[in-house]
Image (spheres, coloured by chain):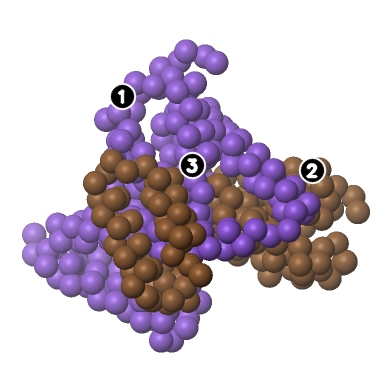
Chain colours: A purple, B brown
Amino acid sequence: MQQTVIKSDNSSHMNFATLFKVWFTIGIQSFGGGMATLSLIRTIAVEREKWLSDIEFARYWSLCQVAPGINLLALTTLLGRRIAGIRGIVVCLAGLLFPSVTITIILTAFYSQATRFPLMTKAMHGIMPATIGLGIYTLANMTISLLKESQSAGKQGLYISIGVCIAAACAMLILNLQVFAILIISGLVYAFYQWRASIKEKETE
Amino acid sequence: MSPLLLFWIYLKASLFSTGGFGNLPSLHTDLIGHGLASENQFVGAMAIGQISPGPSGLWVVCLGYLTCGLSGSLIALGAIILPPLLIIGVDRIYTKANKHPAVEGFAHGLGLAVVSIGFVILFQMLYKEGIDIFSVVIVLISMALMATRKAPILMILAIGGIAGIFMTH
């Protein structure tokens, strides 16, 4: 592989071979579904390699929700592009998918041959809550960074943000609204608030 | 069944969905409707997709394998890689437009909803799993280990799995 050095804002210099290895390790470790993989990517991208900040990560993740296809692949694409443009996208996607797809195909091949293992069901009883714990930690970090950003615009921004969070949760739990609808409405509500706030700010200047 | 048509069925489903299982209704209608897959294959693929590494969206690759062998899985893989690349376009639009307070506000509101819905889904999962002392303790241990920033995620999942094997009857 080329020995091109990739420079990112805050992280150590890394060549494409190392970048592939990093994503390969993510791909090989990402058992337990989407939340575990998201936690893994966040830990490496934000905490270890410092490719981007928590708030930027949260921003990327929310954009992925409204883009077509698998969110985690969209996230990988954005991160790859940020790190090293188009080549970054190819290397990161390849690193993530090569081990995970290979293992997935092997597991599927075994599944179609063998009977289900009761041990797996028992293990899942423990893996599920472990995944939930990972998810809570990851989401909590993203929530804190989002709320901190709202607070930088003033207490009102913070209260509106908390309100949007509670409303979105209630809409999902009680009203059973479609996820996509809740996302768009929340976006529009805060867009309206931010737009009004900026007008008021201009008027007082 | 021509590979090109199969590719289109998978691509169409993923293009108009967002997230890992968003393509399920479309695939279900197309594949089962045309006798290309069975319900059992769907259920099996989804289960394997959950536990195998990578995004749970890879369940489609499992389905491809169960219905059409290795070539089926590769066709499915090709089809699910393409739609997420469109995020580049979405991000470009956002980057150009985000100086406007309304656009920035929209993205922020979106983020707030994403994390809130995420929490709701997690608690629903816990509720379905059963809120007992065992699961609550595992959740808390998992969170604590994450907070140390030193425990590998695979280790946390393995601890959960081993605990599940020994504690479940």
- Residue A72 position (above or below residue B107): above
Residue B70 disc label: 2
Please state the horizontal and vertical placement of residue B14, each as a whole percent of the image.
Answer: 65, 57
Q: How many marks?
A: 3
- Residue B163 position (above or below residue B79): below
Please identify the residue farthest to the top as the structure is shown: A3
Residue where numbered disc 1 is placed: A12
In terms of sequence position, does the residue under pointer 3 or pointer 1 come before the other? 1
Q: Are marks 2 and 3 on the same chain?
A: no
The chain containing the residue under callout 2 comes to B
Please state the horizontal and vertical placement of residue A168, each as a whole percent of the image.
Answer: 36, 75
Give the residue drawn at x 85%, y 47%: B3
Q: Is residue B69 left or right of residue B42?
A: right
The chain containing the residue under callout 3 comes to A
| Pointer 2 local density, CA inside 10 Å: few below 14, some 14–19, many at least 20 | some
Give the residue drawn at x 82%, y 47%: B69
The N terminus of chain B lies in which quarter of the figure? bottom right
Please state the horizontal and vertical placement of residue A124, each as a whole percent of the image.
Answer: 51, 61
| Pointer 3 local density, CA inside 10 Å: few below 14, some 14–19, many at least 20 | many
Q: Quadrant of residue B137?
A: bottom left
| Pointer 1 local density, CA inside 10 Å: few below 14, some 14–19, many at least 20 | some
Q: Nearer the viewer, mark 2 or mark 1?
A: 2
Amino acid on which the number 3 mark rests in the picture? Gln
Give the spatial CA distance, label 2 vs label 3: 23 Å
Residue B102 makes an appearance in the image: no
The answer to whether mark 3 and mark 1 are in CB contact below 8 A is: no
Amino acid on which the number 2 mark rests in the picture? Leu
Please identify the residue farthest to the bottom as the structure is shown: A174
Residue where numbered disc 3 is placed: A29
Q: Are marks 3 and 1 on the same chain?
A: yes
